[in-house]
Image (cartoon, grey):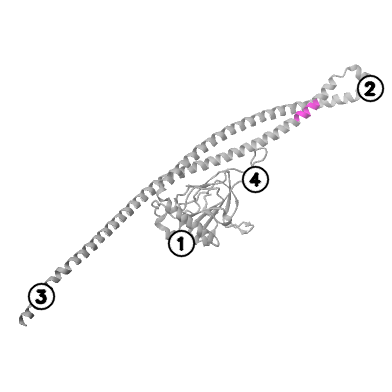
Amino acid sequence: MKNLNQFHFLKLLIGLLMVPVIFDVPFSQGQEAEQTELKDLEKKIEASQSRSEELKKKASEAAKEGQKISRQLVVVARQIQEQETALTTLEENMSVLTNQIAAKKDDVRLQNRNMAHTLAALQRLSQRPPEYIIMRPAEAVDTVRSASLLTTALPEIEKKTELMRQDLAELNQMKETLLSEQDNHRVALANLLGQTKNLERLQKEKLTLYSGFLEGAGQEEARRKTLAKSAKDMRSLIDKLEEELKRAGPSLLPTPPIPEGASFAKAKGALPYPARGNVIRRFGSKIAVGTAKGISIQSRTGARVIAPFDGRVIFAGKFRTYGNLLIIAHGDGYHTLLAGLNKIDTIVGQWVLAGEPVGMMAQTRLASATGNAMGPAPELYLEIRKDGVPINPLPWLKK
């Protein structure tokens, strides 16, 4: 019995000694697997951080380079708008000269016709022989009276002849001036074409620079167009877009460093007109559906449209009766709305500088059988809103 107990004791002792050995193998394998997973996770985190840092670096470089291109675009757009103004002035001068030439030609024709009648009468008198007058006494009296009247009228005829010479000289001068203006117009058009090509090249260069970020921008644009369909009115749309802007944040296109102190509110009275032309409808004017919430600017065909202040494009597309609409957020609750554009040259998420081209007006108008432009010129509609409420844009624009 004693030996049996000793045997069991030895068996138990051997069993206890073997426990660590039995459990040691699976415990070490578990730790090793866990450590492997942790190392893999750390590598993934490091790779993700590395990619994130690389993306930030690329975004920063793209933003800086994009800002350089934007500054060049601002300069070119200003040159184009100045050329557009010069062309408009030349075209107005040419139109005035053309009308003056037409009126002067009519005047000269009338004077020429009157002069021809007078000279014909003198010629008839000079051709009557004395015998004819003697044989017909009644006509002789009329002839003497006519001769007397013509003799009195001779100084007036000479005066009219001199005036006619002056009119002809003036008409020739007008024609020469018109030819000169037409030459200037051709040169101005050639300059505008060259500047336009330069602008399009820079816009393409900027778009290529942002090519790596366009997928996200395209998704944002699609989301915002969906928001536009559900928005009840403009204020509702702006509220939804602002919420989307806060949500999207980093997924938008690269933003250059924003200068300290840049404030839309402080720019009151200094904003450039988005397009060159005449204001034909003012804020508060009566329109078919109430009162105008902005102003309308009548521009030349194909006019370039610029951003009035630095900001982020938060909408680009069609919205209700606005047609092609561009909304730029400037911060502090300020937005500018540009509608009536034929073409939009910017995308959702893009940061634009004051004076940077963002679109253009319609290129052509209806033409008459004579080739002259007919119908209304393009109209650009501008609204400025603060916290979604429209305010009068005119006090904000440069005089």
Seen as rendered, the residue at the extreme bottom is 1
Residue at the spot of label 3: 11
* Rendered view: 158 above or below 102: above
Look at the numbered disc 2 and give the secondary structure of its residue. Answer: helix
Earlier-in-chain disc, 1 versus 2: 2
Q: Please give the range of residues in magenta.
A: 111-118
- Mark 3 to mark 4 CA distance (whole Å): 112 Å
**Amino acid type of disc 3?**
Lys
Q: Position of residue 386 (x, y in %)?
A: 50, 60
**Amino acid type of disc 4?**
Gly
Look at the numbered disc 4 and give the secondary structure of its residue. Answer: loop
Q: Residues within 10 Å of mark 2 (few under 14, many from 20)?
A: few
Do residues under tags 3 and 4 come within 8 Å of each other at their CB atoms?
no
Residue 113 lies within the magenta run: yes
Earlier-in-chain disc, 4 versus 1: 1
Residue at the spot of label 1: 243
